[in-house]
Image (tube, grey):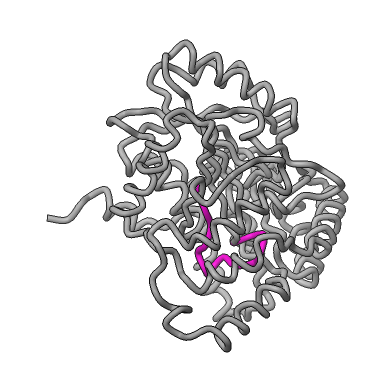
Amino acid sequence: MISDRMYTLGSNRSVIRDLFEYGNERAKVVGRENIYDFSLGNPSVPAPKEVNDAIVDIVNSVPSTAVHGYTSAQGSEKTRRAIADDLNARFGTAYTPANLYISCGAAASLVSTLRALIAEPGAEIVCIAPFFPEYRCFIEANGGKCVVVPADEAQFQIDFDALESAVGKKTAAVIINSPNNPSGTVYSAETIEKLAALLEKKSEENGRAVYLISDEPYRELVYDGERVPFPPLYYKNTVVCYSYSKSLSLPGERIGYVLVPDEAEDAKRLYAAIAGAARICGYVCAPSLLQQVIERCAAVRPDLEEYIENRNLLYQALTEIGYKCVYPKGAFYMFVEAPGGDGNVFSAHAKKYDLLLVPGESFGCKKFLRISYCVSGEMIRRSIPAFRTAFETFEA
């Protein structure tokens, strides 16, 4: 017997991956330079020099067995201490290595945390649209129920009336993602304060903690002087899931962490449950070479200039054509209202011009499209005529 659920997940790619693979096939026909692929969030900015230098130095100067050998299941203490020191310097906290579990990237962080918090079948995890589509897979595959809060399409902050209705007796956690994939919105301090107050109220009503999972792969990718509030400073029952994929341009290396603050309810038990979840999923001992790189580079920040230039170029071009776009303050995505009001329909239309735009339905916003502008500026310039043609030839 084979699991029907796992078969379905394995045989049906996400819409993002499906578009990416479609582009690969089309490139064989028309040439890669004629494909305008805005599907994947694959950083176009190279990894910082410090990262590459660290890799070279570690490989050349550290004994091979120490580079490639096992670390502790929860990660090297030196790596966890470097991350704790960086967080403490930035946010005035007092974290230690014991608060951190080194993970195989953001997905491993989220799956381990969700598996730890879904204590019984049907436990509810609240996702606020727009949200990363894999959240639903992670939740449901671990026995939980995904409860979606409709998007605040005016500001892309949080519709608190809808959130209050969504958080109930069965709610184990609420997931937030700021800077947001796909909208590029950064939750304001006021939004996080209101969220904390609401979760405090709901935790008291339920007689147990409603945890906040803060998914933060884009924390360092913010523009225009925008500041990203650090949720544990506002709400004690916060678990942070972080990845270096975007900040250090390391998406293929799968390295990140889970932070469980001491202040969180049942913190030690929660940490052990996350470790147990990672154990049964095979996520123990994240890649040791990358752990040593992070030990040296925990305080390194990305160069944002190219992303800012791309955002400005694309936003100006699209709005001049007539598209309605959410102006992003972070991450490297632009959320565009689909002409005609249906992202699926317009995405299919845009493919006629080899313009690959991700429909917003799987993010919880059917009338939008996600455009990943972590591509070359040259490709954006070449794509503008295709955007214009797609807009002008579309019939709703």
Image-based side of 287 in relation to 58, left or right? left
State the image quarter where residue 143 is shown.
Answer: top left
Residue 175 visible in this rendered orientation of the protein: yes
Does 101 lie within the magenta span? no
Prevalent SS, magenta region: loop
Image-based side of 387 in relation to 202, left or right? right
What's the residue at 79%, 68% (across, down)? 377
What's the residue at 50%, 64% (across, down)? 254
Where residue 128 appears, x then y in whole percent? 56, 32
Residue 22 visible in this rendered orientation of the protein: no
What's the residue at 35%, 34% (across, down)? 118
Image-based side of 355 in relation to 69, left or right? right
Q: Nearer the viewer, residue 28 or 220?
A: 220
Where residue 125 appears, x then y in whole percent? 44, 31
Q: Quadrant of the N terminus?
A: bottom left
Which residue, as the protein is rendered here, is positioned at the far bottom? Answer: 60
Residue extent of the magenta highlight: 245-258
State the image quarter where residue 177 is shown.
Answer: top right
Where residue 181 appears, x then y in whole percent? 62, 47
Image-based side of 248 in relation to 266, left or right? right
